[in-house]
Every structure is written in C-alpha cells, then in structure tokens.
Amino acid sequence: MQRIYLLLLLVMLLLPASLASAQTELSLWYHGAGNETERSILIGIIDDFNASQSDYTVLLEEFPQESYNSSIVAAAAAGDLPDIIDVDGPVMPGWAWAGWMSPLNLSEGALDDFLPGAIGEWNGEVYSVGLWDAAVSIYARRSVLEANDIRIPTLEEPWTGEEFDAILETLQATGEFEYAFDPGMAWTGEWYPYAFSPFLQSFGGDMIDRSTYLTAEGALNGDAGLAFGNWWQSLFERGLAPGTSQDGADRETGFIDGKYALQWNGNWAGINTLDAVGDDLLFLPAPDFGSGSTIGAASWQFGISSSSMHKDGASAFIEFAIQDEYLAAFSDGIGLIPATAGSAAMSQHYSDGGALEVYFELSNQQALVRPVTPGYATLALIFEKALADISNGADVQDTLDAAVDEIDADIEDNMGYGFEM
Amino acid sequence: MAAMTFETRQRLLISLRISLMILISAIFIFPIVFMIVSSLKPDLQLLRDSGSLLAFVPYGDISLNNYADAFERVPMAQFALNSIFTTAASVAASLLLNSLAAFSFAFLKWRGKALVLSLIIATFIVPFEVIAIPLLLVVNSLPWLGAGGIEIGWLNTYHVQIIPFIADSLGIFLFYQYFRDLPDELVEAARIDGANIWQIYARIIMPISGPILATVAILKFLGMWNAYIWPLMTIRSEELRPIMVGLQYFFQLNTAWGEIMAYLSIVTIPVLIFYLALQRAFIESIATSGIKG
C-alpha cells in the first residue's frame, strides 16, 4: 500500500511538469525593441494569452524597427521564420507573395468593427491585422487662420484645392512665416508615398493602375498625375514649402517654433505638438483637389508565417490580441489610432472629446491603403525619387513618364507579381 | 615695404602651420564635441541648436537625463558585454590565425603559394554585402557541439558572430607585407641554431611584430565593435545582441536624439581607449610600412 501511495505521489509531482511540457511554444517577432511602453503592453497581452489557455505559450523576440525587415528577410532565407510575424501593412503583400506568410484563420466577424486600414488583405484573403492605424492631417493654429480670415475646414467640407492654394499664398504673403506649408520633405523614405500619394489620389491619379496592378501608365502620368505634378512643383517654385534640402531639425520643430504656418504631419506627433502649442492647435483634413480628401493608411500588423507548424495557435493568439481593451491600451500607451470604434471609445485620446478624436474619423472616412501589390517596395522608391526630382525642378511629364517606364519594367521583370498578365 | 627677415618668415610659417593643424584637428574633434554636448541637452533644445554654433555650447537645460533614459531603453550593459566578448575573441583569434597564415606565405616554401596569396588578396574587392546571404546559408547548415550534443545551425549564438570573421584577407596581407620586409638573416640564423618553424614564429618573428599586431588589432577591433549587418541577420535574442544594434532602439516614431547622442558617447569610449592604448605602435606601423587604417 505504501508503494502505491509513493507511486501516486510521484505521478502527482510529475504531472504538472508533463502538462507544462505539453504546451506548444509559439515564437513571436516584434518590431518595437526600445519602446518600453509598447513592450510592456505586448508582454501583458502575451501573459494574459498564456494564462487563458493551456495549449500554447507565446515567446517574444523583439527587434528594433529600423532593421526589423532585414532580420525577417534573413530569417526567411535561412528558413527560420517565427510563428507569428509583425509586418508593416504595405509590405505584407510582398511577404505573402514570396510565400513567407499564410492567411489568418480568424472567427467569423472578428474584424467587422475594424478600420479598413488595419486589415491586411492580399489575393482576397486576410493575411494580417493591425492593433492600430495611423493618419495624417494638416496641423494649423486657430489664431493664425482667424487672423487671416481663413475658413476652418471640416471633415464634411474640407478645403478645395483652389482654396488651399490661395490660403498658402495668403499665409506666405503675411511675411510672418518662412514657409506657408511644411509637407515634410526632410522625412525621406516611406513618408513620401504614405504622405504625398494621397494628394495625387485626390487629383484623380494614383501610383499604379489598381484595376490590374500591371501598369502605372495613365494612373501616374495621365492628366491627373500631370496636374498633381505641376501643383507639387509650384509649391517649391513659389517658395511656399521647404524643398528636399529641409533640415531634419526644422521638420521636427519648425511648426512649433512658428517657422511654418501649416504642417502635414501624422497623429503620432499630435500629443507632443499639443503640449507645445496648446489648445490653439487644430488637426485639419486633407484638401480635396477634385476626387475627394484622401489620406494614407495601414501601419504595423500581426500575421502568421507560412513555415509555422502551429497556425491555429498563432491565429488564436492574434484573435486574442485584437480585443478592444488591448487596442485601447496600445492607443493610450503610444498615441496611435485604436483599430475599432469600441476601443476608440475606451481610449484616452480618441474617445469623445479626446485631443486626437478627429483622427479616428479621418482614418475611417478618408483612408486609402497604399497599393496592395508585392511590387510596392519598388514602386514606393520610384515614386519617392520622382517626387523629389519634380520638387527640384525636373520636367513633370518627363519625370512621371520615366517613373511609369521604371515601374512597368519592374512589374514585367517579376512576371506581374502574381497578377494575371 | 621692408623685406621680412628670415626669423619673421619662420615665425609666420610656424603660425600658419599651427593654425592649419588646429583647423584640421577641429574638423575631427567637432563631431565628438557635438555628440557629447548634445547628449546633455533635451531633444527640443538639441534640435533648435543644431543649425548654429550653439550646438557646441553646453548651456540651457543641461543634465544627464539622456544617459539615464538611454540605459533604461536599451540593455546597454548586456550589449556592451556581448560586444566586448565577441570583439576580444575575434581580435585574439584573428591575430593568431592571420599571422600564422602570413608567416607561411612569407617564410615557408610550398607549391601554389603565390596563387593562394593572389586569391586571398583578390577577395579584397568583394564587399561583405555580396557574401552575406551565402554566408548565412552556410552557417545555418554547419554543425556545432553544444550542451545538448551536435546541433545543426549556428544562428543565434556567440560563435556565429566570431568564427566567420577570424580569417581576414586584409589581416593576412598586412602581416605578410610586414614579414616580407624583415631581414631573411633572422630566420636563417634561427634555423642554423636548430629552431623549428613554430619556434621561429613564436620566439623570433612575433616578438618583433608589435607595430603590425597593433595595426591589425585596431582594424579588427573597429570592424567587430561596429558590427551591425551580420548580427541583424543572425541574432534573434536580445541577450546575444552587440552594442551597435542597440543604436536602432532609439529610432521610434519620435526619435530620441538626445538619448542617441548619449548612447553614442558611451559606445565611442572603448574605441578611443583601445586606439590610445595602441596608438604608438599603430603610428609606427604606418610610418614604416605606409599602411593606412
């Protein structure tokens, strides 16, 4: 009898260990190393998920954002991708097309309430989902607009293109500002397509023909593209905006210091600017150049690697992470737009009366995701170079035509990037 | 106008020379002064001052807050230890292996020596970026005897940051060039005295190779201390990351410039100490062999 008790005791002692070892480990790579707030929120979600069920344990590896994509590319080359991938929205189609990602397996209706920019779709399937989105608006001072008899635009009635242009001339003519408008030319890289392609879209053009994704002909260099290019170039020729030689420090502090009357900036800079400028600060919608006010969309999102042996577990974690309470926690922590209306209502900055409330509706009503194509990375580089060249005085039509040729050649070289040729 | 005396002309020349040296020194020192001064300022002040000479003046809201914040954001001690370990191991192994290889090229006779040396020198023109992916695939399929037995793949380890960089064509070439200029009589005399090749290497050649050891050590130290791309590709765990990767931790949506300057100030200190410690031998090596770092 004593032996049976001893045996039972041994089984009881070993049982928890065997149960623990039965848990499947899911690796999660995240781009937020160095951001303590983001880290603590994510760790909280992971802890909650790990405690909520007994099948999976999520293990976090953090990478710095600036080099995260390089680490993923290297891991893909080495066949060493994690189960759960963190991916920037416009990059996702490229990774999915390369076979590095698998579609998500979420419950029916899990994304019903989500902002369109937070859902990463490719080839008719959802590959990624974001816990937040980002949006851009015009930063302005109420006192400056009122002093110059300038109408304060609304979401329903934004400035028209002509109105916006006249406002810039008016503000420049006051002599109070170095430049009337700071589009942010010092922020090279992804800022150019993210922040400036909406102007092109508002003119009626686009970076690529989205009906086929096989050419940029007509979309980028058609009449609308030309009209946009001419207006864009005139901003710099007329001295209304600082050009590509803009000092990065001026970009950071120029609006706050009163060098620029208006600034095109993202919601992530909103709280710091509010702290410096106070209640006088306004976040205004993009002007409408004829085809509606448009802003960019899609930020970092979670997806699943195609090499994951535990896709159900990875999907379960992602579905767990997109609960409103976590979306609101991220928004409160890092200031970005919560991905659902429910979480916005729970958040500090985006709920009714919150300092950044306007951004949720901007994102909801005006956001257009960047071209959903695996060729986006190349497309973005070509677009950036074309815009910089035009701002520096290059012939608009020639520059746009050359950009179209380059984009089309890249699409052809890559056999249509998965689109039927 | 009265002609200048010889003495006056000499003084003028000396003054000009000193002024020029001060100017050149300033060009090299100003970025370091900017870095250290900026590390003491809050971000807004740092950015406002950056367009003027005030960038070099420690004034206003000066504090060590950026240093405290940098330590909080990045596990700096861990990263520094990792870098010190991988750098020290690479430098030590590199000095040994590359000097041995160069010794073989300089003093031993074997078939195909000239061809092998030419091939090694030819690898100078291949940038690391070109071989990075193939090297990644190679190290990912190599075995290693770990605590759990033989494991395949070196990713996410210390040794993947060290072993691929021990053999170094530049190091071999620099040692070879130095050894080649040593008098043959040294080796011949040792041979006549009955010394074998290991004794000649260890007791005759290496003791008189201080300058080239310092040069190769400094060049290898800089390369390893500044390692960035390779650790990005091969290291997943924070516990194994080197210090330069930590710099990327500060580039968030709102970049923490003051903390970046504080981090860089700390990262630069070991480089300066290492260089100053070997400075005399390094300069001697440059003076005698025309080698530039």
Image (cartoon, rainbow, N blue to C red):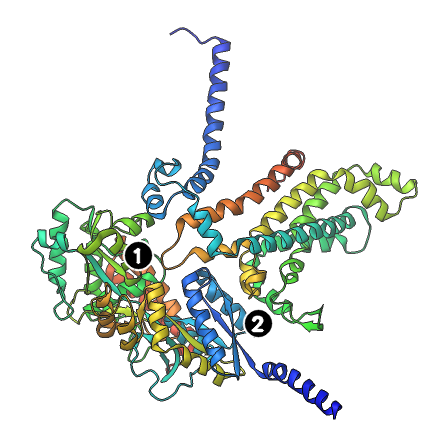
Q: Earlier in the sequence, mark 1 or mark 2?
A: 2
Q: Nearer the viewer, residue B137 or A151?
A: A151
Q: Residue furthest left?
A: A149
- Looking at the rendered image, the quarter that the N terminus of chain B falls into is top left
Give the residue drawn at x 41%, y 48%: B258
Task: Decide if residue B74 is in sight here.
Answer: yes
Using a 10 Å C-alpha cutoff, classify the residue at mark 1 as few (fewer than 14 neighbours), some (14 to 19) or many (20 or more). Answer: some
Mark 1 — residue? A388
Relative image position of residue A272 (x, y in whole percent): 29, 55
Task: Decide if residue A218 is in sight here.
Answer: no
As displayed, is residue B287 above or below residue B76? above
Chain letter of disc 2? A
Relative image position of residue B231 (x, y in whole percent): 56, 60
Give the residue drawn at x 57%, y 64%: B235
- Asked whether, in this view, residue A141 is left or right of residue A296, the answer is left
Q: Residue A78, labelled with which disc?
A: 2
Amino acid carrying label 2: it is Ala
As displayed, is residue B268 above or below residue A4? above
- Asked whether, in this view, residue B58 is left or right of residue A200, the answer is right
Chain letter of disc 1? A
Amino acid carrying label 1: it is Ala
As displayed, is residue A82 above or below residue B102? below
